[in-house]
Image (cartoon, helix red, strand yellow):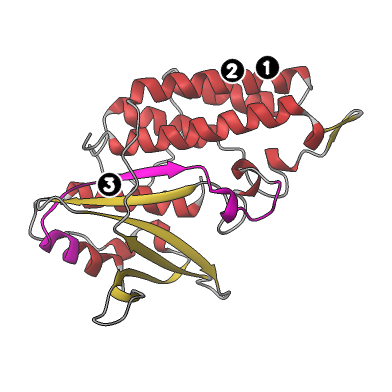
Amino acid sequence: MRGETAQLIALCLKLNSVAGAAAVGSSFAENSSMKFCRVVTFTHLKRKLLRPNPARVTMATGPDDWMKAILSMGLKRCYLSCAVRPENKLLTECSDDWQTTAFAGGGNVWALTTQFADGHDTSWIPVWSYIGGDAPWDVEYQGFNEVFPDESSSVEAAAEQLKAALIDIRDFARDMDLHWAKTFEGALARLAGEEGPSYLGDMSSAGALTPEAEQLMHACQASWVFGGMGSWNDIYMVGDTYMMDCPRYAAVSAALFDAINQSLVAATNSRFP
């Protein structure tokens, strides 16, 4: 799973766990998703008198201060959204989201939306910037009043979508005699309830998710094959087949990528449906 996604899931689950409380509890600065982040800031648009263009102002300089501010505003719940990147935001003219996910700013567009008791919502979109060093990332969560809708499916429906995508890509890998078939077979076993390593780490506290949602999360992690060198994306030639010109390779890859992301959203949002 991408670090950006892991941090969003951890933030969403943490914030939902303290919704309605007076304090945020343990510091999010200790979360493993913060390990390689130098700073994590939260900004939003604010219009100034007599100025037609809104200015972006800093709301908080860390997740703990941001969560305190969100709680003080009367948070009801938060949820995740994942959408296909608009064509004008693509990294290249011909790359689909599953192909660009290895790069900062690539992959789908993710957002965390906070809903408040007074009826207003704010969506927060993370922007990761590489700066180098021991903590090589600066992260800015940009708040917008134009919110992403909660279109998450049920855990059961997401699991069925993931299962279908895994069967298709496993069969393709078998037909092409690729070692990845074993990876997809293992992911199907996790989805069916087979025990295995825990991938959640500190994304989720004990009891934050139902066993079914946790099982789906584990299956998503076991299914994740997208990335750079040595990943599923890096398959170049199989026999005489140039993979980037293989329609079936593109179709099963895109279907699995979408199923994983939608499953992560469904499992996370099931905390407070």
Tell me if mark 1 has few (under 14), some (14-19) or many (20+) residues whose alpha carbon lies within 10 angstroms of its own: some
> Disc 3 residue type?
Leu
Viewer-side residue, 246 vs 39: 246
Q: Is residue 122 left or right of residue 163?
A: left
The x and y percentages for residue 136 are 53, 71
Q: Is 91 located above or below residue 41 in the figure?
A: above
* Residue at 14% from the left image edge and 59% from the top image edge: 71
- Whether residue 201 is visible here, answered yes or no, is yes
Q: Is residue 74 left or right of residue 53?
A: left
Q: Disc 3 on helix, strand or loop? A: helix
Q: Disc 2 on helix, strand or loop? A: helix
Q: Which residues are magenta?
A: 68-94
Asked whether 192 falls inside the magenta stretch, the response is no
Contact between marks 3 and 2 (CB within 8 A): the answer is: no
Residue named by callout 3: 13
> Disc 1 residue type?
Asp
Contact between marks 2 and 1 (CB within 8 A): the answer is: yes
CA gap, disc 2 and disc 1: 6 Å
Q: Between disc 1 and disc 3, whose residue precedes? A: 3
CA gap, disc 3 and disc 2: 30 Å
